[in-house]
Amino acid sequence: AEVAEDLPRWRLLMLTVAMCGIQVCYAVQVGHGSASLEMLGMPTHLVSIAWLAGPLSGMIVQPLIGVMSDKCTSRLGRRRPFIIAGCVLTASALLLFSNAGPLGRMLGDGRDALTAGSVDESSSSSSRGLLLGVVGFFFLDFSIQAIQGPLRTLLTDIVPEHQHAQGNAYFALMVGVGNLLGSWLGALDLEKVLRVPAKWHVDNTQVLFALAALVLCSTVALCVAFSDERPLLASAAAQRGAAGSVTRIANGGGGS
């Protein structure tokens, strides 16, 4: 760990609160991802293939981000730059996925079918929106891993070892709270609850995913602001100094 002092409970809560935002994102994706892909025109039997994004992202992104963050020399520390970048990318993926249909229509979906005189407009004219939806869906799973891995490692970096169990308990608490909050938000008619103006022309899914992005950004901001992480160079220098002292003692206590 980078520090030896105990962290008060509120600091541990601030450190782990980003996990709540992550789970809100997962909850809205699980609750609305399949239905949204089908509405964009993906055949039902292919929707399950899109869910391979989760296992693939865990296999690829977490080890890669782990190695990269171990060597990061940012003044913000080793983990926080990746947490911030992952947050920005995840929020972008949430907005891209939930707005894939309107963006596809802006890019020409629907006009092609009308020009060709297609009768089955819903299945033949949403290729661009579906492509954007699939990209956003995969992008969401991959980018969220860039937060989750460094967040868990941040705990072990800056929290004393005897507090790791307590920190992991708070992580578990935040997982439950995030799942509950995300599922509850997904069950609401947010257009009515938030009184979204009709002139905005947005549906409930767009509002839900935008709200999930806001929750994620807010919780990550709290985590980053209240995490006192030292840059790698300072930590490495301290470690090298300690290692050198041990070596000198082992060799006889100094030079002649």
Image (spheres, rainbow, N blue to C red):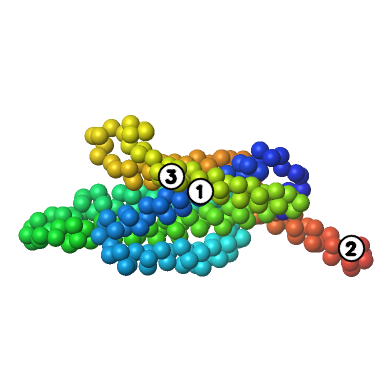
Marked residue nearer the N-terminal end (3 or 2) = 3
Q: Quadrant of residue 235?
A: bottom right
Residue 77 appears in the picture as rendered: no
The residue wearing badge 3 is: 212
> Mark 3: which amino acid?
Ala
Q: 215 or 40: which is nearer to us?
A: 40
Q: Is residue 191 left or right of residue 213?
A: left
Element marked by disc 3: helix
From the viewer's perspective, is residue 134 above or below residue 230? below
Residue 200 appears in the picture as rendered: yes
Dot 1: within a 10 Å radius of its alpha carbon, few (fewer than 14), some, or many (20 or more) residues? many
Dot 3: within a 10 Å radius of its alpha carbon, few (fewer than 14), some, or many (20 or more) residues? many
> Mark 2: which amino acid?
Ile
Q: Position of residue 219 (x, y in %)?
A: 53, 42
The residue wearing badge 1 is: 179
Tell me which residue sits at (66%, 38%) in the image.
Answer: 10
Dot 2: within a 10 Å radius of its alpha carbon, few (fewer than 14), some, or many (20 or more) residues? few
> Mark 1: which amino acid?
Asn
Q: Position of residue 155 (x, y in %)?
A: 65, 51
Q: Position of residue 31 (x, y in %)?
A: 40, 52
Q: Is residue 193 left or right of residue 56?
A: left
The residue wearing badge 2 is: 249
